[in-house]
Each structure stands twice: as C-alpha cells, then as structure tokens.
Amino acid sequence: MEIALIIEKFILITVIFSVSLGVAAYSTLAERKIAGYLQDRVGPSRAGWGGMFQPLADGLKMFFKEEIIPAESSKALFILGPSLALLTACIGSAVIPWGQDVLIADRLVSLQVTDINVGILYIFGVVSLGVYGIMIGGWASNNKFSLMGAVRAASQSISYEIPMGLSIIALLLATNTLSMKEIAEQQHGANWNILYQPLGFIIFLVCSFAETNRTPFDLPECETELVGGYHTEYSGFKMGAFMFAEYLNMFLASAVMSTLYFGGYNYPGMDWVNEMAGPTIGPLIGMAVLFLKIFAFIFFFMWVRWTVPRFRYDQLMNLGWKILIPLAIANIVITGIVITFVDKL
Amino acid sequence: MEPLSNRKKVLEQKPMNFWERLYLPAIFQGMGITFMHMFKKKETIFYPEVEREFSENWRGLHSLKRDENGAERCTACGLCALSCPAEAITMIAGERQKGEEHLYREEKFAAVYEINMLRCIFCGLCEEACPKEAIYLDGPIVPSDYLRKDFIYGKDKLVEDPIKSI
C-alpha cells in the first residue's frame, strides 16, 4: 500500500512538474502570439505549424548562448539567483488541488500532491521566497541597474504582499479553512467565492500582477529606466531561467486565483456530469475545467500586459499603500460584519 | 507675447474625480479596444511568399536596358557615375569591334559596369542623368547576402535579359 502511494505521488509530481513547465514554455509563445494579434500582427509563425515549435527554438537558442559571469560579481550568488527563482516558481503548485479524487483500478487517487492544512500559507511562503531569487541575482550582479531593479522588486513585493494577505484573510473568514482542498470543495457547483468576495478578488488580482512582476507592475525589469533591471547582467540559460520563472509564477498565480475565487475544478452541473461520466472520467473533466480557467487567467495576464502601460514608481506605491490596503481592511470589516449577522440569523 | 497663430489651446488640468481615480473603468475601456484589435485584419505580409505591391514609380534594383534589336543601350558616357551622390557606380569603357553591332548600339560600350548596392541610395539620379535611356531602377528589392563583395553587382546581374525573338 505504501509503495503504491509513493509511486502514485511520484507519477503525480512528475506529471504536474512537466505540465507546468510545458505550460510555461508555451506561455512564451502565447505571449508573443497574443501580443501580435492585439497589435494587428500575427506573431511568430515560421517554426512549425503556426509557430508551434517556437518555444523549442527559443530554448535551444538560450542553451547555446554564451554564459557570461561578470568578473566583479559574487559568483556563487550570481548562479544561485536564477536557480532560486526557478525553484520557488516550481514548488508552489504542490498544494493546488487539480481535481476531485479519481478512481483508478479500484483505488482513489488524490489529484493533489499534498493536502497540508495550511495550504494557503505555504503558497504565500513560496511566493514571497520568489523575490529572493531576484534580490540575490540583482545584488550579485554588481551593477547599479541590477541593484535598483532588485531593490524595486523587494519593496514592491513587500508592499503588495500586505493587501494580498489582507484580501485572503477576508476569504478565510468566509471559508473557515486554510486548506486548498477544502476551499475548493466548498465551492461545489457554481457556489464560487467570487460571488461573496468580489472586492477581495480584485485586490488579489492586482496584487498577483505585482507579485509576478507583470506589466503594469514590471518595474523591477523596467527597460526604459533600468536597462534590464535585475537581469541586466544575465545571459544564456540563466536569463532563460529568470524568464521561465516569471511564466511559471504566472501559471501558479492563475491556478491559485482559479482555485480560491473561481471554484477550482468545480463547474455548474458537475454532479450530473460526474454521474454520467463515472468516477474516473468525471474528475478528469473537472481538471480540464480547472485548466480552462487557468488558461483564461493567463490570457488575461497577457491581455493586460499589452493594454496597460507601466505604472510610475510613486503611483505603484500610492496604489499599494493608500488604496489597496485600506480597501482590503474595509473588505475584512465588511465580511466580518456580514458573517456575524448571517450567523446570528 | 503676441500669439502667431490661434491654434494654441490651454488645457485645464482638473483633479481626477473618484471614478477616474479608480483606474479600473479606464483600464477596462482600454482592454476592450485592444480586444477588438484581435479580430481586425492583420497587416503582416509574409514576405518571401507574398510581396508587397509597390507603387508605379517605386525605385528598386537597376537594370541596364536593351534597344528594340536587343543591343545594349549603354554607351559608357559616365554621366550616371558622375551624377551618383553615393559614388556607387563605376565603369570601364570598351570599343565596339566589327561584327558586334547586334550586341552594342553605339561604337563605345561599357565593358565593365558595376554598382555597389551597399552604397546605392536608390535616389534615381542615374536614371535621370542617362541620355540614352539605358538605366532604369525598375527591379525588385535587392536581395540580402552574406558577403560585401556579393553586393557589387556587375553586368551579369544588371543587364536585362535579351528580348525573345519577336
């Protein structure tokens, strides 16, 4: 039994790992395609059918480029930076419930690597670790632009983790649990958290843009002011690791948002579908629905990137401290009052 | 100061109202605009397969013309080289021998005629300078290449194909 569990988890981890890497790789293609379509172009279309092999070509290119380590840099930290960024981006997906338990060969297989009861805290911990990769990489480069980018990344992520955490507190008041699995289960059918926490969702969405360093909050890599920001000195595969970590983070943020606010693998009419499809196919349909939601969010991330210009640094701080934090606190208060009255009735 | 024209507009900078300070309505408006662009006609031209339509007087690759009998019009007078502001044209004149009347129209002809396509700015002054209507810039785009020496086009590339027997 134990051996079966280990094998099952090993397969699940491998699949999740490769799927998230694949999604991240094809996000780079999707980004360029969407950028093209939003600007009346067609994007990359030469490598393979409609540019299907573009991510492979880009990856190969990254591998074969020269790796430059600046002479004056701290070499160990310079290598550690992108590795840490990539690592933290990869491990976050461990607590995401990808679907209901699947019945495979008379055995209920959980589609979640681990259902720890502090799943949300784990994700927060991992996401805030992510900035260390940028910080270390930017500092180790021994370049003022890199350092500026790193400092910006740090202050931005500190400023936006507070409203993010506060918006989650309101969600926790409503759900009464920290486990991702239970939060997903509570949203059975169309009983999604977005209906109870619309303001909280908007705050969380804005903060996740800032946490993943995506436009309009991509100040750490602001090309116009900071050359390339924290990855100015990086080249070759280490640069690729930073880019890849950004897309992995975007995938993780989309998965977290879908799970916390948009019902995860739940969809209207899922009971009927589960009855018709059986206990093996039914949960897999739920997983497909979750992936649809994730892709929709990834599209949204890219859509915003090619619409909204970058915020100025003081605007970013104003938005974080003067608007989002008060709003998030107000959200907690309102949620608390409503819950108290609903419980009383 | 006296305004020179009445086109100056004084813009009043009003403080943003609450709705505008929310940012979100404006952002959604912008996102609507970008989303509509997804369904617009794409401007991309897939170059090697599809070529852009050029205007009538577009100036491309030079061609050295032949007359109605298929003889080269150029007489190596050097006016095109003289008029060329980029000094892209060089030529060496040669004398027509007996029996070559069907090849060259005048007694003097260009034995070597070279245009450096990296120097040429496609201004068309050679075309205007030519008294014999021998050079026209009516070709396609100059193709790309790897070596500088391959951009010096000689007569083998410039002279137009002989007219098929009419």
Image (cartoon, coloured by chain):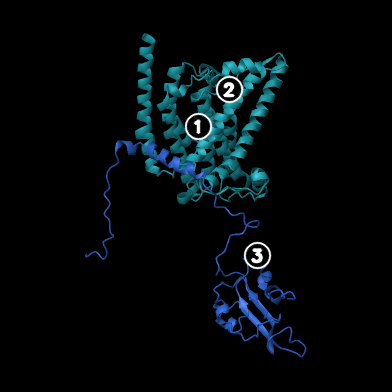
Chain colours: A cyan, B blue
Please name the residue that numbered disc 2 is placed on: A97
* Tag of residue A128: 1
Subunit that carries the residue with mark 3: B
Asked which quadrant contains residue A32, the reply is: top right
| Residue A60: percent from left, percent from top | 67, 46
State which quarter of the image contains the C terminus of chain A: top left
Residue B7 visible at all: yes
Q: Which residue is mark 3?
A: B143
Tell me the chain of label 1. Answer: A
Q: Which residue of the protein is positioned furthest toward the right in this rendering?
A: B99
Q: Residue A250 vs residue A197: left or right?
A: right
Q: Give the residue type at disc 2.
A: Pro
Question: Which is nearer the N-term, disc 2 or disc 1?
Answer: 2
In the structure shown, which secondary structural element does the residue marked by tag 1 occupy?
helix
Q: Nearer the viewer, residue A305 or A248?
A: A305
The picture quadrant where one finds residue A96 is top right
Tell me the CA gap for discs 1 and 3: 52 Å
Q: In the image, residue A165 lies at what x, y percent?
A: 44, 27
Q: Amino acid at mark 3?
A: Pro
Q: Which mark is residue B15?
A: none
On screen, B133 above or below A278? below
Q: Determine if marks 2 and 1 fall on one subunit.
A: yes
Name the residue: 61% across, 59% down: B51
Q: Secondary structure at mark 2?
A: loop
Q: Secondary structure at mark 3?
A: loop
- Please identify the quarter of the rendering in which residue B160 is found: bottom right
- Farthest residue, direction left: B1
